[in-house]
């Protein structure tokens, strides 16, 4: 478990701006067992972090809780990189842990692993799972030190975070599958919902 005093260096961030075109409803409104996936994630975050943010898009999301703040995406419709720069600029902490609102089975143990890695490796800017040859940009820790790089990418019209990790001087610490499976053996944290067919497969409900 991450000590609360150490987690004060982190803000937990959920991106909730996805319009869910393939789903037919905004992803922020997906539910599991009657509870919004968004709130399931926030429950995990508030047990770890002293600060949590929800980055919203072009529609309103009702957050009836005192332990969470909402912020409008300053670059809507750019995908995760817009949410990332919004989070980094609004967070009062050195680091953010960022995820999406369509990961119903995100495990607290995975979040704590990534937070610990960041605290134990202060020379890095990004701590991120690396699975099957791909960086998992929506289960990662990002440091405020990368703000100028992210801003330059956006100004240049380059919106891929994965590309940024390969072609900019950010210091990236990957976390590999064997280490992730120690805390999430079934890798359920990486199940996300993109299509209506996945509703039934993963026990998801709509509004």
Image: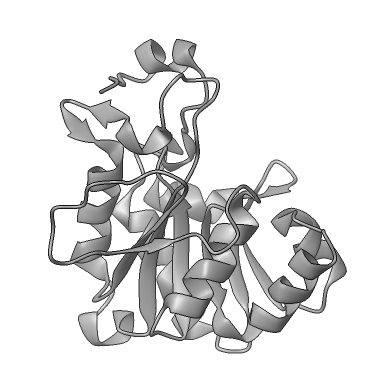
Residue 78 vs residue 179: left or right?
right
Answer above or below: position of 195 versus 182.
Answer: above
Q: Residue 128: horizontal and vertical position, in percent? A: 59, 62
Q: Is residue 94 visible?
A: yes
Give above or below for 101 relative to 80: above
The answer to whether residue 179 is left or right of residue 202 is right
Residue 173 appears in which quarter of the rendering? bottom right
Q: Nearer the viewer, residue 195 or 124?
A: 195
Q: Nearer the viewer, residue 139 or 71?
A: 71
Q: Name the one closer to the observer, 104 or 148.
A: 148
**Where does the image place residue 126, in percent across and percent down from the top left?**
61, 72
Judge left or right: residue 136 versus residue 163: left
Image location of residue 168, percent across then percent down: 83, 73
Q: How many tags in the picture?
A: 0
Q: Residue at x 63, y 89 (%)?
A: 123
Residue 101 pos. (x, y %): 40, 43
Q: How is the image coloured?
A: one colour
Q: Quadrant of residue 108?
A: bottom left
Q: Residue at x 55, y 79 (%)?
A: 143
- Of residues 155 and 117, the one nearer the viewer is 155
Quadrant for the C terminus in the image:
top left
Name the quarter where the N terminus is drawn.
bottom left
**Residue at 60% in and 60% down:** 75
Residue 186 seen: no
**Residue positioned 87% across, 67% down in the render:** 167
């Amino acid at each position: 478990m991450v000590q609360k005093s150490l987690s004060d260096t982190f803000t937990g961030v959920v991106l909730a701006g996805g319009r869910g075109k393939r789903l037919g409803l905004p992803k922020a409104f997906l539910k599991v067992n009657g509870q919004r996936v968004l709130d399931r994630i926030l429950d995990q975050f508030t047990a770890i972090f002293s600060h949590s943010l929800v980055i919203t898009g072009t529609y309103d999301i009702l957050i009836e809780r005192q332990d969470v703040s909402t912020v409008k995406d300053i670059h809507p419709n750019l995908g995760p990189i817009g949410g990332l720069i919004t989070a980094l600029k609004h967070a009062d902490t050195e680091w953010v842990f960022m995820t999406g609102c369509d990961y119903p089975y995100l495990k607290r143990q995975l979040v704590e692993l990534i937070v610990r890695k960041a605290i134990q490796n202060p020379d890095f800017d990004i701590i991120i799972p690396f699975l099957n040859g791909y960086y998992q940009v929506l289960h990662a820790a990002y440091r405020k030190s990368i703000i100028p790089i992210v801003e330059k990418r956006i100004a240049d019209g380059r919106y891929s975070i994965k590309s940024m990790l390969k072609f900019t001087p950010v210091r990236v610490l990957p976390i590999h599958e064997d280490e992730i499976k120690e805390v999430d053996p079934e890798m359920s944290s990486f199940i996300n919902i993109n299509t209506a067919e996945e509703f039934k497969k993963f026990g998801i409900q709509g509004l």
